[in-house]
């Protein structure tokens, strides 16, 4: 795909490729390429018009705020007093303590996947209750 784009954007490569094509194929390609370019142009103009409309609305509200003597900082402060998003819950305390293969003492809350070192100990016949804190 990247090679095709390079060919289309490089005049020399495009001329070399065009020598291998018939005039009818080149005309058909030109029509399709022109159609794609025109579609893109229409999309870009629609996006610009939408942005212009949005900017006009924002300016209208800026003017209304200025007429009422309200500064943007005051408005932001008011919005800042709005309820915040939920806070993260507190971390869970560790329930189990074990020694890993490196001799380091580790803990586990009992939530999520069982740590590899603890799972190996459990597979060797140790009971989970023996690791409780």
Image (cartoon, grey):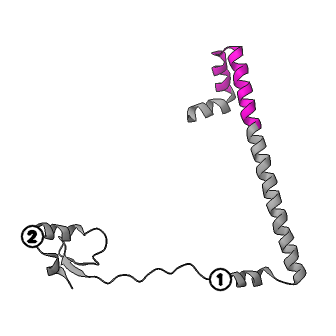
Observer-nearest of 25 and 63: 63
64 displayed left or right of 85: right
Q: Residue furthest right?
A: 67
Q: Position of residue 57 (x, y in %)?
A: 83, 65
Q: Quadrant of residue 114?
A: bottom left
Q: Which residues are magenta?
A: 12-38
Q: Is residue 20 magenta?
A: yes
Query: Residue at coordinates 88% horizontally, 83% vertically from top-left?
Result: 68
Quadrant including the C terminus: bottom left
User: Mark 2 or 1 closer to N-term?
Assistant: 1
Q: Position of residue 24 (x, y in %)?
A: 71, 15
User: Which residue has dot 1 on it?
Assistant: 82
Q: Residue furthest left?
A: 125
Above or below 58: residue 87: below
Quadrant including the N terminus: top right
Query: Residue at coordinates 44% horizontally, 81% vertically from top-left?
Result: 89
Q: Secondary structure at mark 1?
A: loop
User: Which residue has dot 2 on it?
Assistant: 125
Q: Position of residue 128 (x, y in %)?
A: 17, 76
96 displayed left or right of 5: left
Tell me the crowding category of disc 2: few under 14, some 14 to 19, or many 20 or more residues within 10 angstroms, Cα based. few
Tell me the crowding category of disc 1: few under 14, some 14 to 19, or many 20 or more residues within 10 angstroms, Cα based. few
Q: Is residue 44 magenta?
A: no
């Amino acid at each position: 795909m990247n090679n095709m784009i390079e060919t289309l954007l490089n005049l020399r490569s495009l001329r070399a490729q065009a020598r291998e094509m018939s005039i009818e194929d080149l005309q058909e390609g030109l029509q399709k390429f022109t159609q794609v370019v025109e579609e893109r142009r229409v999309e870009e103009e629609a996006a610009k018009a939408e942005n212009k409309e949005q900017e006009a609305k924002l300016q209208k509200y800026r003017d209304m705020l200025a007429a009422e003597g309200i500064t943007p900082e005051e408005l932001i402060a008011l919005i800042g007093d709005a309820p915040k998003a939920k806070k993260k819950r507190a971390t869970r305390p560790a329930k189990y303590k074990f020694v890993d293969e490196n001799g380091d003492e580790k803990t586990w809350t009992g939530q999520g996947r069982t740590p590899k070192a603890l799972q190996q100990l459990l597979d060797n016949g140790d009971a989970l209750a023996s690791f409780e804190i």
